Amino acid sequence: MMTARQRRLGLLLAALVCGGVALALVLNAFQSNLVFFFSPSQVATHEAPTARAFRLGGLVAPGSVRREAESLTIRFVVTDTRHDVPVVYRGLLPDLFREGKGVVARGTLDAGGTFVASEVLAKHDENYMPPEAAEALKRAANDGSTDQKAQR
């Protein structure tokens, strides 16, 4: 026969185990939905993951948008002015998608180094760019000016 104290201890242990399992499930779901941002320079230096989705941000390179005939497939290049990453996307692009404008795409890198986007977001007005993309462009510009000074 279990005493009242032993039953309370058993219930407390069962509650702790259930709480631990629930916490593990929540953390696992959070981890699988976590998507990090990378610039084209970071992709070029292999900082971006190859086995999972991430966000790629920068500017749509002027003259790079190519639409495949009779298909919803669009190819374009995302640049941070130092490095370029080719992107392929199948679907409808946002109305504000333009060459030379800011863009953030979510997807994965294929074996050839092309970013296969599952979602493309364009900036919503003339003054907005996602903070991560703006910071990446600023960093790339600063790195470029340092490289040019070193060459002189």
Image: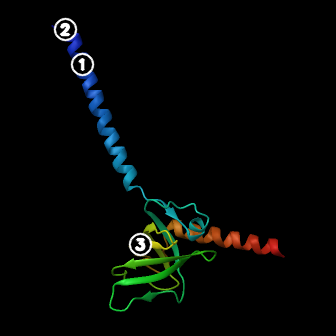
Q: Position of residue 143 (x, y in %)?
A: 69, 69
Q: Is residue 68 above or below residue 111?
A: below
Q: What type is the residue that disc 3 sits on?
A: Ala
Q: Which residue is mark 3?
A: 117
Mark 3 touching mark 2, by CB under 8 A?
no
The residue drawn where x is 26% and y is 22% is 12
Q: Give left or right: position of 131 versus 124.
A: right
* Residue 147 screen position, x and y as percent: 75, 71
Disc 3 on helix, strand or loop?
strand
Q: Quadrant of the C terminus?
A: bottom right
Q: Is residue 96 visible?
A: no
Q: Identity of the amino acid at label 2? A: Thr
Rounded to the nearest whole Å, what is the CA distance between mark 1 and mark 2? 11 Å
Q: Is residue 140 visible?
A: yes
The vertical placement of 92 against 150, above or below, is below
Up/down of 119 relative to 3, above or below: below
Q: Which mark is residue 3?
A: 2
Identify residue type, mark 1: Gly
Residue shown at 30% from the left, 28% from the top = 16
Tag nearer the camera, 1 or 3:
3
Q: Position of residue 140 (x, y in %)?
A: 64, 70
Earlier sequence position, callout 1 versus callout 2: 2
